[in-house]
Image: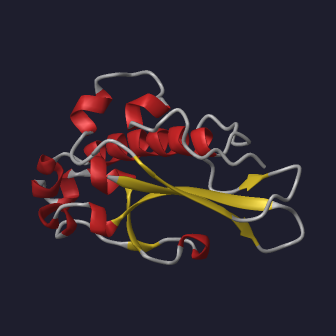
Amino acid sequence: MDIIVTRTRIRGTLPFYEYRALVPAEDIGTDRRALVSCVAAPRVAGRLACVRLAQIIAPDRYFLIPDGRRRALAADIGLLAKRLETAAVRTIFPEMTADLLPVVFLLDSDPGNACTWTSIKDLTAAFDRLAANPSMPTASDLGLAADCARQAA
């Protein structure tokens, strides 16, 4: 499974950036793809169809629960997905120092847009396995290579 990790400048006077980690839709199985919704990757990554990590790691049972009863499990899945996304972004972009990936991040410099496409472990339905470990996920939990393309600001 591949992951696209991006840093995108938000227009304005201050160097505000959005960091994202998305999985290309073509990398997930057809059964899972039928259950999830796609988002467009940032321009720096080519605007291709991608899926957010929360939808990738969600256990199969999540999609069988009626919408009204998903809240508690959805919150847990969302938090774990945010922690995984933070681990991926911190590995690729070492200037990211936040404990959890913020919506926008102000940098001291203005390094510009950047994108890294790299391989990770297959995280399909991995919620139960990953949630069993309460510590912050690491690059090795994602299967990110130690020598993956780091892009410092």
Taking the spot 15% from the left edge, 67% from the top edge, the residue there is 30
Q: Quadrant of residue 90?
A: top right
Q: Position of residue 121 (x, y in %)?
A: 32, 41
Q: Position of residue 93 (x, y in %)?
A: 66, 45
Is 103 left or right of 52, judged from the image as shown? right
Q: Quadrant of residue 104?
A: bottom right
Q: Position of residue 98 (x, y in %)?
A: 67, 38
Taking the spot 52% from the left edge, 76% from the top edge, the residue there is 46
Residue 143 versus residue 62: which sits nearer the camera? 143
Residue 1 versus residue 101: which sits nearer the camera? 1
Q: Position of residue 99 (x, y in %)?
A: 62, 34
In the rendered image, the vertical position of residue 133 relative to residue 42, given as above or below? above
Residue 127 versus residue 1: which sits nearer the camera? 1
Is 98 left or right of 48, judged from the image as shown? right
Q: Quadrant of residue 112?
A: bottom right
Taking the spot 18% from the left edge, 61% from the top edge, the residue there is 29
In the rendered image, the vertical position of residue 49 relative to residue 119, given as above or below? below
Taking the spot 55% from the left edge, 70% from the top edge, the residue there is 45
Query: Furthest-front residue in view?
Result: 147
The number of numbered badges drawn on the structure is: 0
